[in-house]
Image (cartoon, helix red, strand yellow):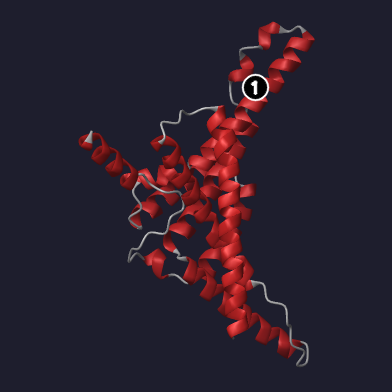
Amino acid sequence: MAVRKNTRSKFIRSKAVIFQYKTQKSALHKVPAVLKLFFLLSLSIICMALPAPALLSGIVLLAVAAGCCRITPREQLADLRPAFFYASLMYFISVFSSLVEILQGSDAALAFAVFLPQERFVLIALRLVFVVQLSALLFRSTSSVELRVGLGRAEFALRRFLRRGLGGVSLKTSCSQSIALFLSFIPEIFESWRQINFAWQGRAGKPGLAKVKTLVFVLISLCMEKASRKAAALEARAGAD
């Protein structure tokens, strides 16, 4: 019994967490957070116009870049789980809708062809993988503190520039802290799911629809509780300032 518990605990510790920050001294870790975020947004927009061969080349280059940042293949595959999930969901929806159209048209000869991925689906799936890889590189190489500080400095520089351009008019609204909190909250969602999933497995819970229906509401309530705590902490910090 003790051996099984030790084996299970080792499995839990070794399981890769999606988008979890990894402390390393690579070249990407040294790049400012604002620059990484800017390139992430730029490349995400550019990839929407790239053909499939260029996307495949980009995916390979991003995998090599992740390896140079000492991100293991297991961690890279873990980061791609959301892309695999949404791609599978899109595939099954496409197949189901095509089968319904074929059955309504009484053309059963084309039933086998609907299981072959269409060119548009492959292109969308490659774009999804590319964007998720970019996001993984950002979160794996940038901590929440670096995001908050970097966005704060960028907002301060933008405010100073606009203040000069607007003739001394100051802008009182602030958005960098909200954006930084939103970005840093994304890895915490996957970490919360990992925790409640392990708790479900520890209680001999079985995978299936019942698990999803139960854990989704737990995940939502847990995330709302964390968000409420962060909001209270920020309000207290603002009051202290």
The quadrant holding residue 237 is bottom right
> Above or below — where is 57 with respect to 154?
above
What is the three-letter code of the residue carrying label 1?
Val
In-image side of 162 versus 190 (left or right): right
Q: In screen coordinates, is 169 left or right of 78?
A: right
Residue visible at 58% across and 37% down in the picture = 86
Residue 79's x, y, as percent?
46, 46
Instruction: From the viewer's perspective, tell me whether residue 204 is left or right of residue 96.
Output: left
Q: Nearer the viewer, residue 237 or 119?
A: 237
Label 1: how many Cα within 10 Å (few below 14, some 14–19, many 20+): some
Q: Which of 179/46 is in front?
A: 179
- Residue 40 can be seen, yes or no: no
Task: Identify the residue position indicated by label 1 in the image.
Answer: 95
Q: Position of residue 239 (x, y in %)?
A: 62, 82
Q: Quadrant of the C terminus?
A: bottom right
Query: Which element is circle 1 on?
Result: helix
Extreme residue toward the left, this view:
3
Q: Quadrant for residue 30, please give it.
A: bottom left
Q: Residue at x 45, y 45 (%)?
A: 194
